[in-house]
Image (cartoon, rainbow, N blue to C red):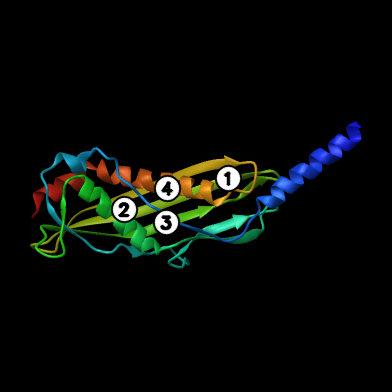
Amino acid sequence: MLQHFKLFGLAGLAAITLAGCGGHVALKIDHTPPSAPTGALASISPTAIKVLDFVDQRPGMEPLLLGKRYDSKQIPKGDVTVQRPVSEIVTQAVRAELAAAGHRLVADGEEVMVSGVIKDFSVNTPSVSTLAWDVVAEVGLVVEIRSAATGDTLVTGTYVTKATARSYINPDDKLIKSTFERALGEAMKMIRSDDAIARHLSSRS
Protein backbone atom coordinates (compact mmCIF):
# COMPACT_ATOMS: atom_id res chain seq x y z
CA MET A 1 0.00 0.00 0.00
CA LEU A 2 2.79 2.44 0.94
CA GLN A 3 4.58 1.71 -2.32
CA HIS A 4 1.42 2.46 -4.31
CA PHE A 5 0.99 5.72 -2.39
CA LYS A 6 4.55 6.77 -3.15
CA LEU A 7 4.10 5.99 -6.82
CA PHE A 8 0.86 7.94 -6.91
CA GLY A 9 2.48 10.86 -5.12
CA LEU A 10 5.37 11.05 -7.56
CA ALA A 11 3.03 10.69 -10.51
CA GLY A 12 0.81 13.42 -9.12
CA LEU A 13 3.71 15.80 -8.69
CA ALA A 14 4.90 15.07 -12.21
CA ALA A 15 1.41 15.71 -13.56
CA ILE A 16 1.18 19.04 -11.74
CA THR A 17 4.62 20.07 -12.99
CA LEU A 18 3.85 19.14 -16.59
CA ALA A 19 0.45 20.80 -16.44
CA GLY A 20 2.12 24.05 -15.43
CA CYS A 21 4.84 24.01 -18.05
CA GLY A 22 2.84 25.98 -20.60
CA GLY A 23 4.48 27.92 -23.39
CA HIS A 24 4.10 31.37 -24.87
CA VAL A 25 2.23 34.00 -22.82
CA ALA A 26 1.15 37.49 -23.89
CA LEU A 27 0.61 39.77 -20.88
CA LYS A 28 -1.62 42.82 -20.59
CA ILE A 29 0.59 45.07 -18.46
CA ASP A 30 -0.98 48.17 -16.90
CA HIS A 31 0.00 50.76 -14.32
CA THR A 32 -2.42 52.76 -12.17
CA PRO A 33 -1.01 55.49 -9.91
CA PRO A 34 -2.31 55.88 -6.34
CA SER A 35 -5.77 57.45 -6.22
CA ALA A 36 -4.50 60.11 -3.79
CA PRO A 37 -1.55 62.09 -5.21
CA THR A 38 1.64 61.45 -3.27
CA GLY A 39 5.35 62.15 -3.53
CA ALA A 40 7.47 65.01 -4.78
CA LEU A 41 5.66 65.35 -8.11
CA ALA A 42 2.41 66.17 -6.30
CA SER A 43 4.08 68.74 -4.05
CA ILE A 44 4.76 71.34 -6.78
CA SER A 45 2.40 73.63 -8.66
CA PRO A 46 0.86 72.28 -11.88
CA THR A 47 3.14 72.41 -14.90
CA ALA A 48 2.38 72.11 -18.62
CA ILE A 49 4.33 69.04 -19.70
CA LYS A 50 4.86 67.41 -23.06
CA VAL A 51 5.74 63.72 -22.68
CA LEU A 52 7.67 62.28 -25.62
CA ASP A 53 7.65 58.58 -26.43
CA PHE A 54 10.22 56.65 -24.42
CA VAL A 55 12.83 54.91 -26.58
CA ASP A 56 13.29 51.17 -26.18
CA GLN A 57 17.05 50.59 -25.98
CA ARG A 58 17.01 47.06 -24.54
CA PRO A 59 19.78 45.15 -26.32
CA GLY A 60 18.59 42.30 -28.52
CA MET A 61 14.93 42.63 -27.51
CA GLU A 62 11.93 42.95 -29.83
CA PRO A 63 9.30 45.61 -28.94
CA LEU A 64 6.88 43.04 -27.48
CA LEU A 65 9.37 40.64 -25.87
CA LEU A 66 9.97 40.51 -22.11
CA GLY A 67 11.78 37.21 -21.67
CA LYS A 68 11.52 33.41 -21.54
CA ARG A 69 9.68 30.68 -19.68
CA TYR A 70 11.70 27.61 -18.71
CA ASP A 71 10.90 24.04 -17.78
CA SER A 72 12.35 22.21 -14.77
CA LYS A 73 15.51 21.41 -16.76
CA GLN A 74 16.09 25.09 -17.54
CA ILE A 75 15.16 24.59 -21.21
CA PRO A 76 13.28 27.53 -22.81
CA LYS A 77 9.65 26.55 -23.45
CA GLY A 78 8.14 29.80 -24.69
CA ASP A 79 8.35 33.57 -24.83
CA VAL A 80 6.92 36.03 -22.35
CA THR A 81 5.56 38.96 -24.37
CA VAL A 82 3.30 41.95 -23.88
CA GLN A 83 0.21 42.87 -25.87
CA ARG A 84 1.46 46.36 -26.75
CA PRO A 85 4.97 47.71 -27.29
CA VAL A 86 7.15 48.24 -24.24
CA SER A 87 7.70 51.89 -25.25
CA GLU A 88 3.95 52.51 -25.17
CA ILE A 89 3.54 50.87 -21.75
CA VAL A 90 6.28 52.99 -20.16
CA THR A 91 5.25 56.24 -21.85
CA GLN A 92 1.65 55.83 -20.70
CA ALA A 93 2.74 54.90 -17.17
CA VAL A 94 4.81 58.10 -16.89
CA ARG A 95 1.97 60.16 -18.34
CA ALA A 96 -0.41 58.64 -15.81
CA GLU A 97 1.92 59.52 -12.93
CA LEU A 98 2.27 63.14 -14.04
CA ALA A 99 -1.48 63.53 -14.57
CA ALA A 100 -2.25 61.97 -11.18
CA ALA A 101 0.13 64.48 -9.56
CA GLY A 102 -1.95 67.33 -11.00
CA HIS A 103 0.16 68.35 -13.99
CA ARG A 104 -1.22 69.27 -17.40
CA LEU A 105 -0.25 67.02 -20.30
CA VAL A 106 -0.11 69.02 -23.52
CA ALA A 107 0.80 68.50 -27.17
CA ASP A 108 2.06 72.07 -27.55
CA GLY A 109 2.59 75.13 -25.37
CA GLU A 110 4.60 73.06 -22.92
CA GLU A 111 6.83 74.50 -20.21
CA VAL A 112 9.01 71.40 -19.95
CA MET A 113 9.47 68.19 -21.92
CA VAL A 114 9.81 64.73 -20.44
CA SER A 115 11.48 61.94 -22.39
CA GLY A 116 13.53 58.88 -21.62
CA VAL A 117 14.99 55.54 -22.56
CA ILE A 118 14.19 52.01 -21.49
CA LYS A 119 17.32 50.10 -20.54
CA ASP A 120 15.63 47.05 -19.03
CA PHE A 121 12.07 45.76 -19.10
CA SER A 122 12.25 42.02 -18.69
CA VAL A 123 10.90 38.99 -16.90
CA ASN A 124 12.17 35.42 -16.83
CA THR A 125 11.11 32.28 -14.99
CA PRO A 126 14.29 30.25 -14.29
CA SER A 127 13.94 26.90 -12.54
CA VAL A 128 15.78 26.74 -9.22
CA SER A 129 15.12 23.01 -8.70
CA THR A 130 13.09 20.26 -10.33
CA LEU A 131 9.95 21.52 -8.58
CA ALA A 132 10.53 25.24 -8.05
CA TRP A 133 10.74 28.32 -10.25
CA ASP A 134 11.51 31.98 -9.63
CA VAL A 135 9.79 34.80 -11.45
CA VAL A 136 12.35 37.61 -11.87
CA ALA A 137 11.09 40.94 -13.21
CA GLU A 138 13.44 43.88 -13.83
CA VAL A 139 12.86 47.47 -14.94
CA GLY A 140 15.52 50.05 -15.79
CA LEU A 141 14.54 53.54 -16.97
CA VAL A 142 16.33 56.83 -17.60
CA VAL A 143 14.11 59.93 -17.49
CA GLU A 144 15.20 63.28 -18.91
CA ILE A 145 13.64 66.68 -18.18
CA ARG A 146 14.30 69.42 -20.76
CA SER A 147 13.41 73.10 -20.86
CA ALA A 148 10.89 73.96 -23.55
CA ALA A 149 12.39 77.45 -23.83
CA THR A 150 16.00 76.44 -24.44
CA GLY A 151 15.91 72.69 -25.16
CA ASP A 152 18.59 72.21 -22.52
CA THR A 153 18.58 69.14 -20.31
CA LEU A 154 17.67 70.17 -16.78
CA VAL A 155 18.09 66.82 -15.05
CA THR A 156 18.15 63.09 -15.69
CA GLY A 157 17.14 60.35 -13.31
CA THR A 158 17.90 56.64 -13.41
CA TYR A 159 15.48 54.14 -11.86
CA VAL A 160 16.21 50.44 -11.49
CA THR A 161 13.87 47.98 -9.78
CA LYS A 162 13.50 44.25 -9.37
CA ALA A 163 10.63 42.07 -8.15
CA THR A 164 10.68 38.31 -7.55
CA ALA A 165 8.27 35.52 -6.68
CA ARG A 166 8.67 31.79 -6.01
CA SER A 167 6.37 29.13 -7.45
CA TYR A 168 6.25 25.35 -6.99
CA ILE A 169 4.60 24.79 -10.33
CA ASN A 170 5.73 26.41 -13.56
CA PRO A 171 4.59 30.05 -13.13
CA ASP A 172 1.37 30.95 -14.91
CA ASP A 173 0.59 34.23 -16.65
CA LYS A 174 -1.20 35.63 -13.59
CA LEU A 175 1.87 35.31 -11.36
CA ILE A 176 4.23 36.59 -14.07
CA LYS A 177 1.96 39.61 -14.68
CA SER A 178 1.58 40.52 -11.00
CA THR A 179 5.32 40.21 -10.37
CA PHE A 180 6.17 42.37 -13.36
CA GLU A 181 3.61 45.02 -12.45
CA ARG A 182 5.21 45.22 -8.98
CA ALA A 183 8.57 46.02 -10.58
CA LEU A 184 7.00 48.62 -12.87
CA GLY A 185 5.05 50.11 -9.97
CA GLU A 186 8.22 50.47 -7.91
CA ALA A 187 9.92 52.31 -10.80
CA MET A 188 6.98 54.72 -11.04
CA LYS A 189 7.08 55.23 -7.26
CA MET A 190 10.75 56.19 -7.52
CA ILE A 191 9.94 58.73 -10.23
CA ARG A 192 7.04 60.31 -8.33
CA SER A 193 9.22 60.57 -5.22
CA ASP A 194 12.27 62.10 -6.91
CA ASP A 195 12.90 65.56 -5.46
CA ALA A 196 15.33 66.50 -8.24
CA ILE A 197 12.78 65.72 -10.96
CA ALA A 198 10.12 67.72 -9.13
CA ARG A 199 12.44 70.65 -8.53
CA HIS A 200 13.35 70.98 -12.21
CA LEU A 201 9.77 70.48 -13.36
CA SER A 202 8.79 73.43 -11.19
CA SER A 203 11.69 75.61 -12.39
CA ARG A 204 10.35 75.67 -15.98
CA SER A 205 13.57 77.26 -17.27
Disc 4 residue crowd, few under 14, some 14–19, many 20+, Cα 10 Å: many
Q: Which residue corresponds to mark 4?
A: 181
Disc 3 residue crowd, few under 14, some 14–19, many 20+, Cα 10 Å: many
Residue 119 screen position, x and y as percent: 39, 58
C-alpha span from label 2 to label 4 = 11 Å
Q: Nearer the viewer, mark 4 or mark 1?
A: 4
Q: Earlier in the sequence, mark 1 or mark 2?
A: 2
Q: Nearer the viewer, mark 3 or mark 2?
A: 2
> Front-most of 14 and 77?
14
| Callout 3 secondary element | strand
C-alpha span from label 1 to label 2 = 26 Å
Q: Is residue 178 above or below residue 144?
A: above
Q: Which residue corresponds to mark 1?
A: 134
Kind of residue at badge 4:
Glu
Tell me, yes or no, whether the two marked residues, 2 and 4, touch with CB atoms within 8 Å: no
Kind of residue at badge 1:
Asp
C-alpha span from label 4 to label 1 = 16 Å
Instruction: State which quarter of the image contains the N terminus.
Output: top right
Residue 199 screen position, x and y as percent: 15, 45
Disc 2 residue crowd, few under 14, some 14–19, many 20+, Cα 10 Å: many
Q: Which residue corresponds to mark 2?
A: 93
